[in-house]
Amino acid sequence: MIVIPAIDLKQGQCVRLRQGRMDSATVFHHDPAAQAKTWEDCGAARIHVVDLDGSTEGRPTNLDAVEAIVRAVKIPVQLGGGIRDRETIETYLQTGVSTVILGTVAARHPERAMEWIKALPEKIAVGIDARDGFVAVQGWTESTNLSAVELAARLQEAGPAAFIYTDIEKDGMMQGPNIQTTKAFAEATSIPVILSGGVSSMEDLRQALPLENCGVYGIIVGRALYEGRIDLRDAIALVETHHAREKNNPLP
């Protein structure tokens, strides 16, 4: 399992929201590329980037900031927000983004998303954002009657690189992740899962580590890093210690 620091872009700045509400943005850094380099220097193996403006407008709006982030670091960058067509996917991949994340289009047009996923193996992940177990789209501003598990089951045969599962009620609220819901989601799919939303302390991280046994291979952390509640170096060390302990004491 790896800890993945998050960079959310709004009007070219690094911000964090609460429950995805655009009117609740707190600016944490005016230079997202510099922030990305800081996370890399702390030992991050991957960075998670979201174009928040793009997610609501349905088109890339922070492309310059994304390009600057990719130039600033050597580690993989995964990116979501406003990716609705093949042209946008190609644009981001050409900038050096390692993995693009489909959200709204995957929920509304799964067949189209599956076609793109098959055409670009290991390059496309799917973000599944759930409120009360049901998928939310359009930057979390609209709810659907499709459950997160149902959407994952429909898309997994295409072989996305990962499902990034977010419990919206927990996102940015500093109340801990929804362990049981994430566990149930991960157990329902054969695709690797990345947990997003709610990790607010080292104890939350410890509680989430056993999810690795269910197929969760990454944990995205945002606000807790920016507010100093979690030190990224300490978080990475905690995960590495857990891995070493598991290796030395395998279960029978």
Image (cartoon, rainbow, N blue to C red):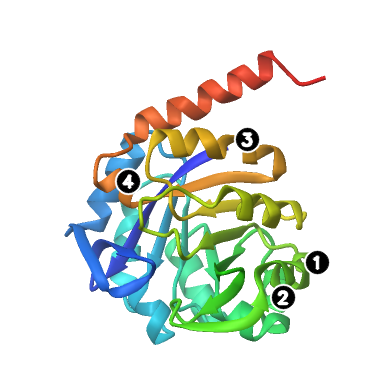
Give the numbered dot on residue 102: none
Find residue 157 and name its label: 1
Please tell me which residue lies in front, 83 or 196. 196
- Check disc 3 and report its element: helix, strand or loop: helix
Answer with left or right where residue 174 lies relative to residue 84: left
Crowding at dot 3, Cα within 10 Å, few <14 / some 14-19 / many 20+, comes out as some
Using the numbered discs, state the Cα–Cα distance from disc 2 to disc 1 in whole angstroms.
Answer: 8 Å
* Distance Cα–Cα, label 3 vs label 2: 30 Å
Q: Which mark is residue 114?
A: 2
Is residue 229 positioned above or below 16 on the image?
Answer: above
Which sits earlier in the primary sequence, circle 3 or circle 4?
Answer: 3
| Image coordinates for residue 148, horizontal then vertical, percent | 65, 69
- Horizontal side, residue 85 vs residue 10: left or right: right
Q: Which percent across, then down, holds residue 36?
A: 31, 49
Say which amino acid is labelled 4. Answer: Ala
Which residue in the protein does label 4 denote? 224
Residue visible at 69% across and 45% down?
A: 215
Query: Disc 3 and disc 1: Cα gap in Å?
Result: 26 Å
The residue positioned 39% from the left and 82% from the top of the image is 56
Res 119 quadrant in image: bottom right
Can residue 138 be seen at all in this image of the molecule?
yes
Amino acid type, mark 3: Pro
**First of labels 3, 1 by sequence position:** 1
